Image (spheres, rainbow, N blue to C red):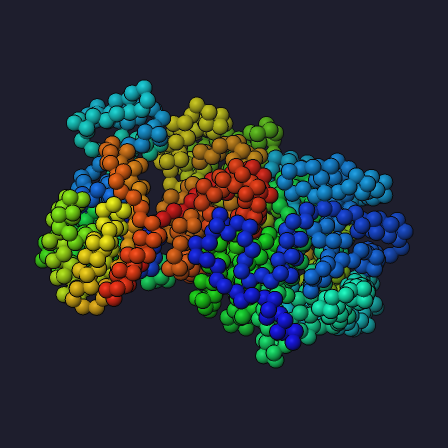
């Protein structure tokens, strides 16, 4: 079975489902959203992160590198990505954490041990574990295994998904899942393709299918100024959510914050986000009203 | 009629706005305060602390005339009585609760019998930037002429310092520990509910019965007891006289007052002061005034380390409130107004100024009255009442420095109360702090208290617990645990001064294993603790013999029945605490040594210590390696946490159970207040990468910046310690305001607290402020005059803190969104 690549584990997570939660972030995502605030979550590979300002030019990385991919420059260190085999020895040796490896393969036992440590907080708050990403459903077999293990421990499980996955897989995993945090970017197919790199037909169908199965779903809408905060997008989203079978779903609005800059730099990449902006209070209020008009309760934050 | 008037005066309380953090609410007065309270608050906040020499003048004249004529307890009581008869009274406009320790608000007397300030001390106090106390040149001249010559050489402080052994002095000067009682009397106590059922006349009857039953033929202590009891009796008279003088003054003021409302208020003040403290209070208002007279009596009689404390004040006031509310004689708004008046009274009383090392380690106006809110009753029930909620509102709306306040959350405490408290915490004033009665009752039981007395317990001052109204629990001073490690790594020598301050425990280069190093640390620890205890015991006897506190002895149970003073084992329980500081710094340093020197051999001992001794200058590689590649305390990592557990166990072994001079024992405490900053100042760099002079970790909190796995990991690390072994642990957490934006977030915070307490945590406190705000406050202090932040165990104005303290708060790990 494919062991998942995990790039972060957050404890005292209070924005990813009910109560105090532990959130496990899987690496790898079929979407490539322009605004993604976790750019290291997209690649399904281990990645090397580098923070120039932390480098003290001690040269330890160059010393330990088995393939001589690290080279000391007058300012810091550069890595030759063609040579680099992502073995992580440089990160191990780096005293300042200027070099970090993003992504570590984790076993069910390992993750379960960490999750179980948070039990007192789950117990007090009605919390649990959330599998997020990236796209956790890239690892369906593993998910089923760990979801089942958590369930046997009585731990509440949520999955934060893009929905871009085979319907069959989604419904299988749903049998072990207490709550879906289902991301809905936008209903317009062209726009969706333009901003996320994929068509949204499957995503919308899957949401309908999941709702049809009676799954507990919270719809999450990343609200990106300049992308989907216009009247048309909002009304379309509200109408779609309202049309889902079953009870009315709660909607969480996640306003865009430009926080990814530092992470892009660590990955050695750049994105032009100048067209995006954080929606103002007025817009948020208006969006909430639109949803309310469809009989839906929307609120800001996870 | 009066009720109707008040309804108009007091606007209905509206909840504070969401996300109403410091920047937004700066200098905005809370919504529930009426104009009277606004004026009283303004006067209290804006009046600069000053020194009053009146008490010292009265006392010096009294001693000149009477010293040698009486037994020591009688001399003290007569002196107290004399001052209560003569001191300048103050009844301010608008006041409903009356009496001040000094001649006016924020005016602080001196206590030359304990510490006689020099002309130079006054000059420093009058001109320094932080914690300034103004005094006129004329008063300084009078002091120099009348007071200083009489007391020179006779003060308790001088007598202590002339008697201490050399090894104590060396360790004290090196900053291995502090000594609380070198310039203030052992204080730090709190009251139970007795004074709401008994007036001073009742105490006098009880004292008379004890005197009548003394057995002069068979009890060798009968004469001493008689003197102590007579002194107690006289001190009851002193506070009655003090109150009656206020009644007379209020009547006089009423005669010359033209405003009919104020005439009625002054007449009421006179009526109340005629009744309490002579008799037990009949109303909510009398109960507050009763406590206030007792409070003032204890802090005027002597300068105890930390002011008096009403203990579970909401529980004591609840029956009065319930009865009057039901009878329709007291509205919620009237009760709240009276509480506000009381709160402001406490704020009018800054701590008497400290000098020397003590001033360095405790730089604050705060005199550590800590109102305990909520908790459990003596019969184990939930203690939360409407008065508890009123107090939370008062705390939130007044946002003033004093009194400190804490909420006590047991498994029986309703969520509504915890949420209300968390909402006040969200305002970012650093209070209330949160305590766990389920754990501290066990702490007190372990120390030998009865269940009922343990349940009456709580925290006074910062985080230390005692059995309220029945215990003298003396904080004797802080222990600089990281410094003990530093001295161990230098074979007994203080590397900062080059002086021998400990014992020889071996050259660190010769330790063949971590266990050998650790054993040397423990030997050093025991030597330092024993050195401290020896002098603590000496000081305890000094106070018992030469500075008894007969009035305090009246209100602490069993002193009357034993005929013994509060300082001489009179109370039912008599504990000495030593407060150990820097668990995080010590753990992290030992973790570095264990991992990098002994296990992985990353560095040889000599290499690491050389880098430490050079304050890591040119050794950034070593420093970064130890900082980033070592398990540190507070991350739920067993490698580090096991070291913390071992240190905690050895601190316990070194302190707990050591006999004190009152037939009882010393106990462990894990409090730091602001001492971690002073302790850091006297230290070189430490193996955990901390630079020379930087503050060490506070209380039982992780080192600053060391806890990188969020608050739940901190909680798990902290609760690996058995908190019931100590008389208090302290956990400081700094949260960004953004982490408490929504009401759900506040509920999560409450759940985090519940989790900590379920796992056995003693105390937790939060600073809800972002780094940007703190930095802005450093740059433009005038814009942030009332920015209150949490220190270790109390809140203080950011502007009143020196640059080191400010930096320390800025550097605390900031928990951001998770």
Rendered image quadrant of residue A220: bottom left
Q: What residue do we see at 31% from left, 42% from top?
A: A258
Q: Is residue B482 left or right of residue B70?
A: left
Image height of A260 relative to A203, above or below: above
Residue B691 position (above or below residue B773): above
Q: Quadrant of the N terminus of chain B?
A: bottom right
> A75 and B171: which one is in front?
A75
Name the residue: 85% across, 40% down: B145
Name the residue rendered at 77%, 38% in the picture. B118
Vertical placement of B502 versus B571: above or below?
Answer: above
Picture coordinates of residue A296 (x, y %)? Answer: 25, 64
Residue positioned most to the front: A231
Instruction: Give the left or right position of residue B564, taking residue B40 as reference.
Output: right
Q: How many marks?
A: 0
Q: Nearer the viewer, residue B646 or B362?
A: B362
Q: Furthest residue to the bottom? A: B327
Left/right of residue A108 with respect to residue B159 in the rendered view: left
- What residue appears at the point 28 percent right and 56 percent down from the top-left corner? A287
Snapshot quadrant of residue A57: top left
Task: Tell me if residue B527 can be seen.
Answer: no
Instruction: Say above or below: B723 vs B336.
Output: above
Give the x, y percent position of residue A178: 23, 62
Depth order, front residue of B166/B82: B82
Q: Nearer the viewer, residue A121 or B682?
A: A121
User: In the figure, residue B461 lies in which quadrant?
Assistant: bottom right
Q: Position of residue B126 (x, y in %)?
A: 71, 39
Indicate the position of residue B98 as horizontal and vertical percent values. 72, 62
Residue B339 seen from this side? yes
């Amino acid at each position: 079975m494919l062991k998942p690549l995990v790039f972060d584990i957050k404890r005292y997570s209070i924005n990813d489902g009910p109560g105090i939660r532990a959130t496990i972030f899987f690496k790898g995502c079929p979407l490539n959203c322009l605004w993604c605030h976790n750019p290291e979550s997209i690649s399904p590979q281990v990645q090397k992160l580098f923070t120039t300002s932390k480098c003290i030019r001690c040269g330890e990385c160059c010393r330990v590198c088995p393939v001589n991919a690290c080279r000391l420059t007058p300012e810091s260190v550069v890595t030759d990505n063609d040579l680099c085999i992502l073995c992580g020895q440089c990160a191990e040796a780096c005293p300042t954490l200027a070099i970090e490896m993003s992504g570590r393969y984790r076993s069910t036992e390992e993750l379960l041990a960490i999750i179980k440590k948070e039990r007192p907080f789950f117990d007090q708050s009605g919390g649990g574990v959330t599998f997020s990403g990236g796209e956790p459903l890239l690892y369906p077999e593993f998910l089923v295994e760990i979801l089942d293990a958590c369930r046997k421990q009585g731990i509440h499980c949520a999955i934060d998904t893009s929905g871009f996955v085979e319907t069959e897989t989604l419904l299988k995993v749903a049998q072990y899942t207490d709550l879906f945090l289902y991301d809905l970017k936008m209903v317009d197919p062209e726009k969706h393709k333009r901003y996320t790199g994929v068509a949204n037909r499957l995503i919308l169908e899957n949401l309908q299918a999941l709702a049809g199965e009676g799954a507990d779903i919270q719809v999450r809408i990343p609200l990106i100024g300049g992308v989907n905060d216009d009247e048309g997008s909002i009304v379309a989203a509200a109408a779609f959510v309202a049309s889902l079978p079953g009870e009315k779903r709660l909607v969480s609005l996640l306003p865009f914050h430009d926080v990814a800059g530092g992470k892009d730099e660590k990955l050695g990449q750049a994105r032009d986000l100048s067209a995006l902006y954080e929606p103002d209070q007025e817009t948020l209020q208006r969006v909430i009203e639109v949803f309310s008009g469809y009989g839906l309760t929307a609120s800001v934050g996870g | 009629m009066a009720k109707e008037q008040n309804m108009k005066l007091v606007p209905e309380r509206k909840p504070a706005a969401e996300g109403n953090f410091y920047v937004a609410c700066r200098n905005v007065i809370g919504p529930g305060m009426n104009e009277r309270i606004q004026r009283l608050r303004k006067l209290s906040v804006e009046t600069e602390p000053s020194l009053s020499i009146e008490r010292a003048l009265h006392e010096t004249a009294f001693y000149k005339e009477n010293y040698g004529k009486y037994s020591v307890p009688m001399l003290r009581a007569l002196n107290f009585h004399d001052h209560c008869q003569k001191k300048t009274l103050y009844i301010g406009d608008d006041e409903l609760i009356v009496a001040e320790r000094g001649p006016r608000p924020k005016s602080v007397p001196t206590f030359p019998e304990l510490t006689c300030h020099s002309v130079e001390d006054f000059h420093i106090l009058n001109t320094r930037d932080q914690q300034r106390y103004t005094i006129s040149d004329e008063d300084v001249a009078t002091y120099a002429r009348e007071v200083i010559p009489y007391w020179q050489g006779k003060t308790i402080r001088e007598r202590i310092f002339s008697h201490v052994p050399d090894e104590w002095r060396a360790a004290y000067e090196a900053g291995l520990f502090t000594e609380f009682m070198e310039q203030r009397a052992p204080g730090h106590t709190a009251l139970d509910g007795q004074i709401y059922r008994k007036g001073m006349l009742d105490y006098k009857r009880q004292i008379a019965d004890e005197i009548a039953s003394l057995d002069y033929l068979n009890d060798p202590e009968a004469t001493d007891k008689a003197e102590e009891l007579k002194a107690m009796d006289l001190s009851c008279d002193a506070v009655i006289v003090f109150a009656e003088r206020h009644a007379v003054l209020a009547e006089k003021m009423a005669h010359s007052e033209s405003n009919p409302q104020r005439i009625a208020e002054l007449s009421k003040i006179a009526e109340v002061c005629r009744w309490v403290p002579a008799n037990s209070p009949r109303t909510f208002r009398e109960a507050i005034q009763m406590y206030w007279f007792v409070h003032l009596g204890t802090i005027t009689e002597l300068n105890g380390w930390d002011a008096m404390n009403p203990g579970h004040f909401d529980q004591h006031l609840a029956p009065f409130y319930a009865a009057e509310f039901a009878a329709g004689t007291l509205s919620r708004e009237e009760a709240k107004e009276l509480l506000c008046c009381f709160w402001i009274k406490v704020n009018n009383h800054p701590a008497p100024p400290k000098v020397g090392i003590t001033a360095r380690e405790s730089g604050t106006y705060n005199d550590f009255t800590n109102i305990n809110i909520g908790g459990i009753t003596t019969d184990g029930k939930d203690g939360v009442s409407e008065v508890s909620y009123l107090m939370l509102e008062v705390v939130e709306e007044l946002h003033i420095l004093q009194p400190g306040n804490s909420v006590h959350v047991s498994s029986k405490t309703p969520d509504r109360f915890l949420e209300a408290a968390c909402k006040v915490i969200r305002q970012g004033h650093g209070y209330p702090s949160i305590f766990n009665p389920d754990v501290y009752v066990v702490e007190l039981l372990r120390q030998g208290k009865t269940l009922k007395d343990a349940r009456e317990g709580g925290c006074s001052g910062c985080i230390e617990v005692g059995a309220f109204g029945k215990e003298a629990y003396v904080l004797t001073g802080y222990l600089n645990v990281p410094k003990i490690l530093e001295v161990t790594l230098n074979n007994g020598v203080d590397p900062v001064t080059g002086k021998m301050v400990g014992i020889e425990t071996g050259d660190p280069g010769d330790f063949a294993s971590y266990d050998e190093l650790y054993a040397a640390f423990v030997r050093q620890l025991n030597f330092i603790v024993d050195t401290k205890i020896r002098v603590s015991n000496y000081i305890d006897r000094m106070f018992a013999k030469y500075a008894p506190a007969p009035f305090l002895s009246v209100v602490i149970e069993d002193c009357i029945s034993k005929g013994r003073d509060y300082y001489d084992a009179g109370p039912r329980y008599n504990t000495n605490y030593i407060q150990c500081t820097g668990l995080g710094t010590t753990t992290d340093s030992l973790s570095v040594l264990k991992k990098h020197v002994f296990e992985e051999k990353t560095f040889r001992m000599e290499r690491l210590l050389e880098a430490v001794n050079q304050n890591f200058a040119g050794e950034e590689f070593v420093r970064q390696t130890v900082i980033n590649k070592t398990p540190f305390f507070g991350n739920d990592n067993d490698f580090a946490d096991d070291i913390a557990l071992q240190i905690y166990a050895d601190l316990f072994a070194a302190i707990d159970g050591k006999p004190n001079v009152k037939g009882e024992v010393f106990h462990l405490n894990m409090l730091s207040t602001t001492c971690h900053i002073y302790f850091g100042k006297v230290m070189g760099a430490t193996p955990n990468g901390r630079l020379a002079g930087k503050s060490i970790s506070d209380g039982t909190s992780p080192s600053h910046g060391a806890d990188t796995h969020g608050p739940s990991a901190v909680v798990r690390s902290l609760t690996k310690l058995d908190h019931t072994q100590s008389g208090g642990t302290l956990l400081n957490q700094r949260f960004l305001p953004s982490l408490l934006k929504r009401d759900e977030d506040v509920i999560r915070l409450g759940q985090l607290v519940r989790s900590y307490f379920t796992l056995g945590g003693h105390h937790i406190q939060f600073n809800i402020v972002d780094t940007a705000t703190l930095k802005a406050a450093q740059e433009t202090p005038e814009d942030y005059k009332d920015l209150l932040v949490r220190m270790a165990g109390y809140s203080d104005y950011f502007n009143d803190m020196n640059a080191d303290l400010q930096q320390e708060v800025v550097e605390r790990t900031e928990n951001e969104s998770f």
